[in-house]
């Protein structure tokens, strides 16, 4: 039996559709089914799931996102719940734990792709909570586990912070960026990630892997490809950062802007991941390009297709201060 935690979220929903339903037990606080509606932070209720089911593998998709302003909830969900989960995995002799970490553990301007050995450099609580969760897994005596370090996950249903960029492009607005846009980006498609997760269930290991698209693209080139794909008349406007990013951080503190420090630095800095380790170990590679997955998401948004995945990153995000910028540009 596979226990899928966070089965109603963005990643959890995709995994739920792909895994064998007869061998799958789904848990999510948002579920309408009483037997599935469990908070991962509730140790007592979670233990009953392990006690009365023969859990072979655990896939933990539960995560308090980077956009959250609730520091306590970030650490409770991303770190402390992971500690409790490890206790249950050991007590009930689970064969494998699958955990998802993030590229937010490295937030700096990297000239070369980071490897699994690159030193941590988080700048906010989300990244810090993931590092703490990683460490508790690494230092546990679980015999079989895997940690996937991933950048932003994209699919045709991905919105969240992307909805702001998409609105600018669809409405032929000028798109302001900080700097020259030559910073490199790299994302991962949900389908590629799901395929690697499924593969991991058949491998015995204690490993951390970087996992991302093989295509590396500059921020400017990515925006231009999105503009071209829709026939938009949008243009890019570059601005020097004379305190603009700090201003947005202040606005974010007062919840007037959706961009936190992680988002701002991601849009300005180069960050790519060396994924050779997992490609070699799993004997497979990611297939979908960063540009292709973003174009897919934009076109789907433009066509106004309704999505039944109700998660924080599959709904348009409130623009905040960007409403004013949208009207001005």
Image (tube, rainbow, N blue to C red):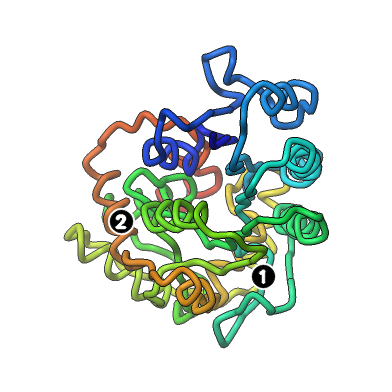
Figure check: 296 above or below 77: below
Q: Which mark is residue 228?
A: none
Left or right: residue 128 versus residue 5 is: right
Residue shown at the point (55%, 82%) measured from the top left: 113
Q: Dot 1, crowdedness within 10 Å: few (<14), some or many (≥20)?
A: many
Residue that mark 2 sits on:
169
Q: Secondary structure at mark 2?
A: helix
Q: Is residue 204 visible?
A: yes
What is the CA distance from the residue labelled 2 to the residue labelled 1?
Answer: 29 Å
Figure check: 29 above or below 289: above
Residue that mark 1 sits on:
106
Left or right: residue 22 versus residue 307 is: right
Q: Position of residue 96 (x, y in %)?
A: 63, 49
Give the quadrant of the N terminus: top right
Figure check: 243 above or below 197: below
Give the quadrant of the C terminus: bottom left
Q: Quadrant of residue 291?
A: bottom left
Residue shown at the point (43%, 61%) measured from the top left: 188
Proximity of marks 2 and 1: CB atoms separated by less than 8 Å: no
Q: Position of residue 240 (x, y in %)?
A: 55, 77
Q: Secondary structure at mark 1?
A: loop
């Amino acid at each position: 039996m596979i226990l899928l935690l966070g089965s109603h979220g963005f990643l959890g929903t995709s995994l739920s559709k792909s895994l064998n339903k007869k061998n799958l037990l789904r848990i999510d606080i948002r579920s309408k089914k009483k037997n599935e509606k469990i908070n991962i932070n509730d140790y007592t209720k979670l233990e009953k799931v392990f006690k009365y089911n023969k859990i072979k593998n655990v896939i933990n998709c539960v995560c308090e996102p980077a956009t959250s302003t609730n520091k306590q909830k970030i650490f409770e969900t991303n770190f402390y719940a992971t500690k409790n989960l490890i206790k249950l995995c050991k007590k009930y002799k689970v064969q494998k734990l699958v955990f998802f970490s993030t590229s937010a553990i490295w937030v700096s301007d990297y000239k070369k792709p980071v490897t699994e050995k690159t030193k941590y450099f988080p700048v906010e609580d989300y990244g810090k909570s993931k590092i703490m969760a990683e460490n508790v897994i690494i230092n546990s005596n679980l015999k079989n586990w895997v940690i996937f370090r991933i950048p932003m996950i994209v699919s045709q249903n991905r919105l969240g912070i992307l909805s702001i960029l998409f609105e600018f492009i669809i409405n032929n607005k000028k798109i302001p960026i900080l700097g020259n846009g030559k910073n490199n980006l790299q994302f991962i498609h949900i389908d590629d990630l799901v395929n690697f997760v499924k593969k991991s269930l058949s491998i015995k290991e204690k490993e951390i892997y970087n996992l991302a698209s093989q295509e590396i693209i500059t921020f400017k080139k990515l925006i231009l490809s999105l503009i071209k794909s829709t026939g938009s008349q949008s243009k890019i406007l570059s601005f020097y950062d004379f305190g603009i990013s700090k201003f947005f951080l202040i606005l974010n503190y007062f919840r007037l802007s959706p961009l936190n420090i992680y988002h701002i630095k991601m849009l300005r800095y180069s960050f790519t991941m060396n994924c050779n380790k997992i490609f070699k170990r799993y004997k497979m590679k990611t297939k979908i390009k960063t540009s292709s997955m973003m174009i897919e998401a934009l076109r789907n948004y433009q066509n106004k297709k309704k999505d039944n995945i109700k998660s924080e990153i599959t709904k348009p995000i409130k623009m905040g201060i960007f409403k004013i910028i949208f009207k001005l540009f």
